[in-house]
Image: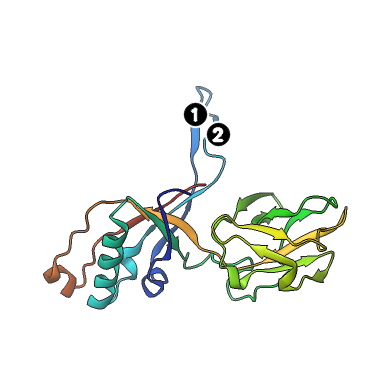
Amino acid sequence: MSGFHEVRFPLRVALGASGGAGRGTDIVNLSNGREQRNQRWRDSRRSYDAGSGIRSLADLYAVLEFFEARRGQLYGFRFRDPVDWASCPPGGTVAATDQIIGTGDGVTTSFQLVKTYRDIGGSWTRRIVKPVRATVLVCVDGVSAPTTAFSVDAVTGMVTFAAGYVPAAGALIEAGYEFDVPVRFDIDRIDVNLAHFDAGRIPTIPLTEILA
């Protein structure tokens, strides 16, 4: 991913940010009163307002410093979603069996980390491209793989098995992990008024997801 810095937005501020997933849907109202709905985007795209996470002047300065280091909208960066940042639900513990990422064929060595959201009505699978490398756990056919059996690309989210550990044909491959969202600032200017800040008004600092 070009134009990207592998650094994380200040975590203290991120945990108080607002925002989440968005979808693009076209809705056509027909003359008979019914409607047709068409999916315009294949994947959801997340957006956040980091301003809601600022609680102090120190937080504000940390964001300003980070903004300058990214040169506004020029460089993307990692952001931890305040709710959806792991392969398991909030409050859970990451486990190697959290998500199915593929099935072995005895030849393929690399598998993309994914997260599937599902209920009884349907499902959607999301590519995970910014995992936190040290948190990734892998399981092959119900057996936890040692860390020497695979490597993780923290930039792309690809898990690659080492020689001698390539999953056999039909072997179910699962993984658990923490991850960040690749985002960029959606503005090239942050307006700060300390009088307003002292009165409890905070600047709007929009972030938008960079889709790979």
User: Quick check: can you spot residue 112?
Assistant: yes
Q: Are marks 2 and 1 in contact (CB under 8 Å)?
A: yes
How are the colours assigned in the image? Answer: rainbow
- Report which quarter residue 67 is drawn in: bottom left
| Residue most extreme to the right | 169
Mark 1, residue position: 28
Residue 12 in percent (x, y) is at: 38, 75
Q: Residue at x 83, y 68 (%)?
A: 142
Question: How many dots with numbers?
Answer: 2
Position of residue 131 in the picture relative to residue 113 (left or right) = left
> Is 100 located above or below residue 15 in the figure?
above
Q: Which residue is mark 2?
A: 37
**Whole-percent x, y for residue 22 in the image:** 47, 49
Where residue 108 appears, as percent x and y from the top left, is 78, 50
The mark nearer the N terminus, 2 or 1, is: 1
Q: Is residue 119 visible?
A: no
Measure the alpha-carbon separation of dots 2 and 1. 6 Å
Q: Secondary structure at mark 1?
A: strand
Place residue 43 in its image quadrant: top right
